[in-house]
Amino acid sequence: KTSIQFILLVFLSSTFLYLETIELGSCNGGGLNVSCIDIERKALLSFKESLTDPSARLSSWVGGDCCKWEGVRCNNRTGHVIKLKLRNPYQRNLDGLAADGAAYEIGGEISPSLLDLKHLSYLDLSMNNFGGIHIPNFIGSLEK
């Protein structure tokens, strides 16, 4: 029984260390100072241009390092954009409005410039308002 507990403890510790290593390698502010890839920054700016953003949630999307922008995560070793998390963070009521009555939903078109984010492995646009548009065909071309 003791050896099973020890093996389980070693397994859980190894799993925890592995997950922490993955997280540190893909979060902002780690030990490395790698900036985003220029073509990916341009792709994100093109994506932003195709959107409506009434509450200025994307106002941090300025400057040369897209890895520092709100909702964008890059791999600290390569600088590639790996995560785009633009989920509406505000609780909506039945009208799609935040409790204070202001709309926080991103809308507009989903630009094919996202295809230039070759290392994107996570895309969250949920709880926004894209007005019932069809999912663009190019979304099926995203890899990973």
Image (cartoon, rainbow, N blue to C red):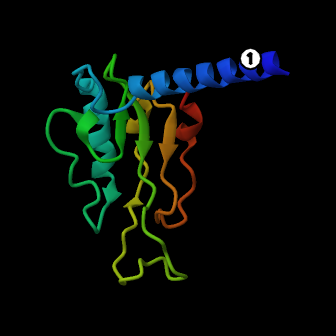
**Depicted 92 relative to depicted 11: above or below:** below
Give the image quarter of residue 32: top left
The C terminus appears in which quarter of the rendering? Answer: top right
Percent of width and height locating residue 117:
40, 29
Q: Position of residue 31 (x, y in %)?
A: 27, 21
| Residue found at the very far right of the displayed protein | 1
The residue that appears at 34% across and 45% down in the rendered structure is 47
- Identify the residue at image location x=34%, y=17%: 78
Question: Which image quarter is the N terminus in?
Answer: top right
Residue 118 locus on image (x, y percent): 44, 24
Is 62 on the left-hand or right-hand side of 95?
Answer: left
In this rendered view, identify the residue nearer to me: 97 or 4.
4
Which residue appears at 39% of the width and 60% of the height?
108
Q: Residue furthest front?
A: 2
Relative to 106, does residue 15 appear above or below in the rendering?
A: above
Identity of the residue furthest to the left in this view? 63
**Residue 48 higher or lower than 117, as above or below:** below
Secondary-structure class at tag 1: helix
Residue to which mark 1 is pinned: 7
In the rendered structure, which amino acid carries the disc numbered 1? Ile
